[in-house]
Image (cartoon, coloured by chain):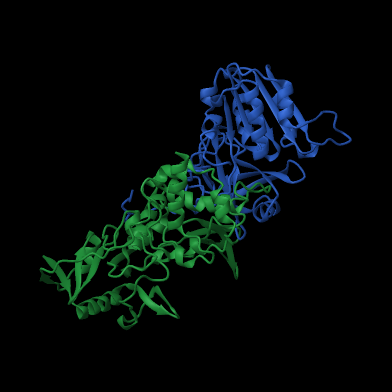
Amino acid sequence: MTKILGKTGLESWLHNIMQERALVAPKHVGDLILFDPVQSVDEVVFDYENTNLSPKEFFFPRTDTLFTTKSQDNDVELIPTIIDQETVIFGIRPCDARGIAMLDGPYLDDPADSLWAQHRNKTTMIGLSCTKPAPQCFCTSVGSAPNDSSSVDIMLTEVDDGYAVEAVTEKGERLLQGVELKESDVTLSAPSCDTSVPAEGIVETVKKVFDSPYWSRLADRCIHCNVCAYVCPTCYCFDIRDRTDKGKIERIRTWESCQSKGFTRIAGGHDPRADKGSRLRQRFCHKLLYFPQQFGPLSCVGCGRCVVSCPVNIDIREIISDLQELGAKVG
Amino acid sequence: MVKEATEKVIPNPFVPYPATLTSSVDLTTDVKLFTLELDRPEDEFDYKPGQFAFVSAFGVGEGPFGLASVAYRKEGLQFAVRRVGTVTNALHQLEPGAKTGVRGPFGNFFPLDDYKGKNIIIIGGGIGFAPLRPVITTILDNREDYGEVLILNGARSPSDLCFASEFDDWAKPPRTKVELTVDAGDDNWNGRVALIPDVLAELGPSPKDAIAIICGPPIMIKFTLTRLKNLGFGDEQIVTTLEGKMKCGLGKCFRCNVGEKYVCRDGPVFTFAEISQFIEQF
């Protein structure tokens, strides 16, 4: 039996959640649909292919304070950031949730990143299955599916008279306590998504073509604008710097991109990735080789955001195909 | 792959131990040797030669530096820091008594216990000599545990040779030689004017029962590796410590990777056997 929550039931549930916790949901922001804190259910967008950005920033903010300093006499006190806001994210797509779960790999690896761990602990993710994958979507090619519930706490799937509800984790069950669900024998259909990207075996292929001139040819047109990293649900490189404001010092971390010039330049001037080709190779090798070597899955969830955002049409789907073709030639 | 985030309070690994700068001494025109003492007795900071730590100039930032001291002497945490950027400039301006912070120790270390009984060749270039100083200190403090020791220290110019005031002490014990070289001499320099790899070829240390430990700029490491190979050193007999752009030291920021290896966590100490398996250039 499937458990169903009616459309008005969902609205009042979200309304109730908002009374005790921060609710983050897809919302119209200018021409975009973005995850943003909402104050009223009226602001929530229910009908969208995917948001323009993943909700990664609610776990790994663009700028996050690691600690602040308080100076007194000659003493400096360091005050670590504590996250106590309970947050519920509604409407997260399976690909984006999977991206966040993947980053537990590096971030919770000992010693755990305490900020990431706190954000994860304090956040409950309500997923929404995809009913109409966008043209750029290819989650099914990289080990997921439009209805993959493995990385969310609760999964909702739109049906005729509301939403089918699956409590995936204990955290999800807790959030659903007291919510009235109808029993139904409706069968859930799963829409298909692009399965044509030949990602199988790509790890071995990338090793073979690592030294190919392919990368620098591809990088010729890269303008290192970094948008691919900023829209990516699994890009997690960062920079750390100090920010001072009226005597208050904060050590902050910010998003960074491996496509930036000087990303790897060390004191004294040596830069192992001074050319665009090796930087572009780093981006794809991190996703298709290093991350799988370190943590298992490819760190591409197939959301296709980099595909639509890249101003020079560098397309990871095409790259995977090209590499497989190249690899086959190398033998 | 996915680990359960637990509810227990996880210490924030980005918060440094509060520390005080107790001494700041000029080693060269642009290198200072800092000595730091941790402010809180409960903070544990045990480290081995080759490990590194981040030192903070609050309000400017922090940077990773090789520990130039040895833990067992309990003489404070020492770092030889060359003034090259904003953080190192700020650190150079700190006066003794200034408050700072230390995060670490990070990375692996030179397995000096495994080298007991062996002849040791220590080759360092410029500020690259900093992480080799604790290697020398440890070996000389336990001199009878090791065979012949050859120390080769090179720099751009005589005034850029780090730890010059310690050379005489290093050369004192029996079976211990210190060789110096510079890229360009000056009026007071009577020593060698040659590149480290060339001096190494000239000195021609025997690979028999030997370990070569190298640190310096990447270009020096690469040429020195080649010379050592030519001298017959095996891949496992050559050990180096690498540098990488680093922000966290924890294997998270993904700045220092060479292929799937992190310089900060898998290194910074690598044997040539390991380096030859790297998919990417360092």
Where is residue A62 shown, x and y percent of the image? 48, 65
Q: Where is residue A65 drawn, in percent x and y?
A: 49, 63
For residue B101, say whether it is visible: no
Residues A48 and B43: in front is: A48
Above/below status of B150 relative to A147 = above
- What residue is at 54 percent from the left and 23 percent from the top? B115
Q: Nearer the viewer, residue B108 or B14?
A: B108
Work out which residue is located at the far right of the displayed protein and give it. B187
Give the percent coordinates (x, y) of residue A191.
Answer: 26, 65
Horizontal arrangement in the rendering, residue B69 relative to residue A291 (left or right): right
| Colour applied to chain A | green
The chain displayed blue equals B
Q: Is residue B92 visible?
A: yes
> Which of the 4 image quadrants contains residue A128?
bottom left
Residue in view at x 36 percent, y 74 percent = A26
Q: Is residue A301 left or right of residue B274?
A: left
Eyeballing the image, is A39 above or below A113? Answer: below
Whole-percent x, y for residue B22 in the image: 64, 46
At a point 58% along the width and 17% down the height, the residue shown is B209
Left or right relative to B176: residue A241: left
- Locate the C terminus of chain A by quadrant: top left
Q: Quadrant of the N terminus of chain A?
A: bottom left
